[in-house]
Each structure stands twice: as C-alpha cells, then as structure tokens.
Amino acid sequence: MLCVVRKNERDDNRPRERRKIAAKMRAFTSRKVFIMSKPILASLLIVLMAVAASAQPARQTKPAPKPAAPTTEDKSEQAASLFDAGQRAHEAGDLAKAVELYGKALELDAELWQAEFQRGAALFSLGKLAEAKASLARVNALLADYPVTDQLKQIFARIQISLGEIALAESKFDDAEKAFRKALELNPQAARAQSGLAEALYSTNQFADAIAAAKAAIAAGDERPAIFALLGVTLTVTNKFDEALPALNEALKREPKNALALLYRAEVFIAQNKLAEAAADLRASLAVEANPRTKLRLASLLAQSKQFEAASALFQEVVNEDPANADARTGLTAALIDSGKAEAAVAELERLIKAEPNRAVLRAQLAELLLPKQPEKALEQYRAAAELDPKNANHHVGVASALVKLRKFQDAVSVLIPVLATNPTGDIEYYARTNLATAYFELDDFPNAAREFVWILNHQAKRGDRKRTAITLYFVGICLDKLGDYEQALKVYNQFMELASSDNQLEIEKVKLRLPPLKRQIEMGKGKKKG
C-alpha cells in the first residue's frame, strides 16, 4: 500500500501518520525526480506492503463466491503500479504515455501528489505549459495540510523552481523572478533556483544582479555549460570583457559546440581587436547553428578586416535566403562600395530603393555613388532623401554638394546658409563649409570664401591633415591675392609650397608663375597697406 496521508484520518491516528509523512518526505527529497527543464530519470521511493502468497484453494463443489469490491488498499497498490509504469514511460521518453499513466494513478488515488508532480514535469516537456502549471497548483494544494518540515520545504522549493521555469518558457520574466526567489527562501542552496533567477534577471536587463545570481548558482554546484555561458554573455554585454572570457572558455570547455558561447566569445575577441580569433568563433557558431544574424556579424567583421570579397559573398548569401533582409542588402552595398565595385553597388541600391522607396538613407547612399559621374541623378536622390528626412543635415549638405558639382553655386549657398545656422558639428559642419567656400570662391565672393577657407584651415590643422591643408592654403592664398593683400598672400603661398606634394603639381606650377609678379607688386608698394 502506498504510504499516503489522508486528510480525513481520525485525530487519534495523527502521531502515526506524521511519522509516515516524515518518512515519505525524506524519501522524496533524498531521491532524484524529473526536473522541469531537464528531466533526470529516477523513481520516487514508494513503500509497498508485502502481500503474502495464498495457497491454491481446494476444489469446491459449490459455485465460487463473487469477488469482493476493491478495497482502499487495493486501489493504492494499483495506483502505485500505474505510477511505476508512468515513471518507466517517462524514462523512455514516451511523455504522452507517462501523462496517461500518471493520470490513471491519480484516478485511483487522488492524493498521490508524487504522480501529480511528475505529470506536471511531463506536461512541461510536452510544451503544455498551462496544464503543467495546473498540476503544480494541485500539488501545492495536496501538500498544504502537511506538517512543515525541512523535507517539505525542499519539495515546495522544487515546485517553485518548476513554476519559475514555466514562467521563463512563457516569457513572463517578472513571474519567473518571483518564483525563483520564493524557492531560494525555502532552500537558499538551490543551484537551479539561482541559475533560473539569473536568466530571469538577464531577460529584464538587470545585468548586475544576473551576474551575481549566475555566480551564486556556480558556487552552489551548477556546473552546466549553460550557466557559464549565461555568465559570460552577461559580462560581455556589460563590457566586462576580461571577466567574460574565462566564463565563456569554461562553457566551451564543457560544450565545445555551444553556439551562444562561441558567438559572444567572438564579441570579446572583437573588443580586444583579435579579429582572426573572432572570425573563427563566428564560423564555428555558424557550423552549429546557421543563424542569419551570425552570418551578418561575420560578414561585417570580414568587411571591417577589408576582406570585401568574402564579406560580399556572405551578405549575398543572406540576401538570397531572405531578399527582404534590409541589413544584409545594406551591408552588401557597403562591401561593394568599399571594394570599388561602384556599378554593382548602384544596382543593389536601386533594387533596395525599389523595395523600400521611403528609406532616406538608401537614397543618400545612392546619391553619394552617383555624385562623381552623374551629379544630376545624385541631386535627385539627395533631394528625395531630404524630403523624407528633412531634419537630417547630411542630406541637405548632399544637395549642396551636387549643386556645386553642377556649378549652380548660388543655389548651393542658399541651401548651406540655413544648415550652418543650426550650428552643426563634426563632419556635417566641415563638409558644409568646404562646399560653401567653394561656392563663394566660384562666385568671386573672395571675402566670404577667405573666411570659410580659414575656418577649414584651422580645422585641418587640429586633425593633422597635411595633404588637405596644402590645397586649402593654396585657395586662401588666391583669396588674399584677389583681395589685394599681397604680403599675406605671399606668406600663404610660401607655406603652400613647403607642404605641397606631387599631388599638387598643377597648383605648384601656378604659384611659381604668380610669385615673381607678386613680389614686384609688393616692392612697388601696391596692394593693401597695414595700419
């Protein structure tokens, strides 16, 4: 007979029943049971009364009496037998059969909470989360009147862990956190509660607490690759790369084909500028799991390493698999541009724009490619980008650059003045002023051109851009020369000659021709006078 406590037993039996309860709790907590997230197959301890074998009955001349109705003791034995059969089916992986057998056992003995617990585990493994949760609720109800012992606390902790894992599977991370914390209140040493809590905390971006919980799980004896991977991932996303690497190495030592650990170790290597090692990990991760995002990461890394052919091939592979993947198409375009395949990049961008006509960034990219040889088409695309995203100053500067290319200088000035009025910074301001300086120069507005070129000169000096500084000095010299400031013009021309290289050969020849007459003009007292 199963050693099961009945809630309706008479009071005078309570001391004896409490001893039975304690024995059952010790038996349950000392044996392994099926775990909701990873079933560990072993039988619960079921105490069966020995049934003595009866002798063969003598022949009767009278009809045999009708069999007696099954007693409570008989039903308990049948329930025990069905429970054992359910355990065997569970162990063999026949979860549906296990659920059926556990159910039949409970029909015979509704208070056999071990069967209800195991049925919940099997239902969880089958993905029937609501039914699994209901089973655990019934277990809680069945155990509610049991005397509170250390063994009972451990069982309740297991129930909370199982509820937490169901909540994780349902992406109900707040519920999962509450369940795991309850489990830890009941059993502070529960490693699985700590690891589940770490996952719930990570999923809600509580990274510092997730790291602490993962470390606590490992300290409590959780040696699964998954917990080391979770610790390494969390340390990686918080930029603690030196700490993350040992955890990820440990995960991969235990499970060399752990795709997640490989993926995040690659991120650590990228942060450490170990691009070859990162690429190797990304390829290894792809060999385990052909994830499109991993392909894109590897393709981007290859492009960063200037392996444009390999990057383009990988981006193209993702595009072939998912033609609507905008990241893959954009990456492919960038790789084609960087590899000097402008025509292929233009064709790819045109396909992208046809599919997504309202993406301003695509039109701006296409315009940039078209600008050197087809400024009219570039102007069309830059204007479209500016209409789609009017607050993006880059698009307006692009419009101006196309207008300058088309020699529509006054139109370019009209576009750039409002841009500079917004006080842009960085490259936006730099390229706005270079285009504005060029437009003023071509309009023979030398005072304004000189002012812009001087700003550009100072900017280039801060950046140590010797090559661009030389050509800017050339234009500053011309502006000063045109304004009649011959002495300053001569100084600037001489500075240009000191910095100029073979790339400036045409400008060098022009300055050489200008220097003799300029010096004569200065000697004759011509030009602006100081004071």
Image (tube, helix red, strand yellow):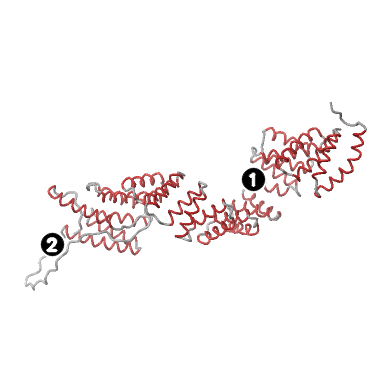
Task: Tell me which residue sits at (26%, 55%) in the image.
Answer: 28
Give how far across and how far down residue 138 sits, in percent.
28, 50
**Vertical placement of 43 versus 382: above or below?**
below
Give how far across and how far down residue 288 sits, in percent.
50, 61
Crowdedness of circle 2 by 10 Å Cα count: few (<14), some, many (20+)? few
The residue under label 1 is 361
Task: Tell me which residue sits at (52%, 47%) in the image.
Answer: 239
Q: Nearer the viewer, residue 417 or 493?
A: 493
As shown in the figure, which amino acid type bears the numbered disc 1? Val
Camera-near label (2 vs 1) is 1
The residue under label 2 is 68
Disc 2 to disc 1, C-alpha distance:
85 Å
> Mark 1 falls on what kind of element?
helix
Name, please, the residue furthest toward the left. 61
Q: Horizontally, is 70 left or right of 480 in the view?
A: left
**Vertical placement of 302 versus 58: above or below?**
above
